[in-house]
Image (cartoon, helix red, strand yellow):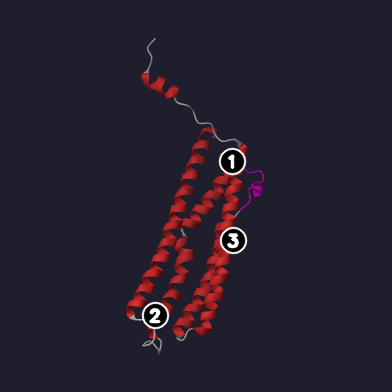
Amino acid sequence: MTLDPKRAWQGSLPTAEPPSLAQVRAAADKFYRRVRRRNLIEYVACVFVVLAFGRYVFTLPHLLQKAGSVWVVLATFYAAWQLHRRGSAVSPEAAGPTPLYAFVRAQLVRQRDALTSIFWWYILPFVPGLAMILFGNGSAPAAANGPPIWGRWLALAIVTGVLAGVWWLNQLGARRLERRIIEIDALTADEG
């Protein structure tokens, strides 16, 4: 009897046991709480944005700045609605008769899809309003007393950097969720 080295090596490796149902349930609960906390922080930030830019409607001097502020307020409501629609937290209790793995996977896919499409429903709606405010800043009648041209370019660079950073961080989060989806697929492939 000859021993196949490849099979002997493969047989010596420990096989990974799938997590228990209690572990999956605990992870699902943790994910639910994390999404809920993220959304709560986003909704609180929306309130601050609406209050700040709502005030700008009455305090900024130029009509373009006022219109941009209104646009940002409307974009904030739209983003909050889309966050609720696309990325609201769904409790594991809502799984009902659905197998827990399938429920968790569906929630991961839902959150991943919300993060990957964030440019279209979260970032892009703010761009016109912010652009109106920045351009209005240079068009104000008192532009001579306003910020210098380099200050406006700096403001544009900062706003662009922040929006790009938001997009990038969300893409990282989407990739993390994708890895978890792949792990669930690998675990459930053996069962199916």
Foreground pick, 42 / 150? 150
Q: Nearer the viewer, mark 1 or mark 3?
A: 3
User: On the image, numbered disc 1 is attached to which residue?
Assistant: 24
Residue depicted at x 62% and y 38%: 22
Whether 98 is among the magenta residues is yes
Which numbered circle lies on residue 137? none
Sequence-wise, the earlier of marks 2 and 3 is 3
Marks 1 and 2 sit apart, C-alpha to C-alpha, by 51 Å
Confirm whether residue 84 shows in the render. no
In the displayed structure, 168 sits above or below 124; it is: above
Foreground pick, 191 / 93? 93
Residue 89: x percent and y percent? Answer: 60, 55
Whether 91 is among the magenta residues is yes
Sequence-wise, the earlier of marks 1 and 2 is 1
As shown in the figure, which amino acid type bears the numbered disc 1?
A: Val
- Circles 1 and 3: CB atoms closer than 8 Å: no
Residue 86: x percent and y percent? Answer: 55, 59
Which numbered circle lies on residue 135? 2
Circle 2 SS class: helix
- Of all residues, the one furthest to the bottom in this rendering is 141
As shown in the figure, which amino acid type bears the numbered disc 2?
A: Phe
Circle 3 SS class: helix
- Circles 2 and 3: CB atoms closer than 8 Å: no
Q: Which residues are magenta?
A: 90-100
Q: Quadrant of the C terminus?
A: top right
Circle 1 SS class: helix
Foreground pick, 92 / 147? 147
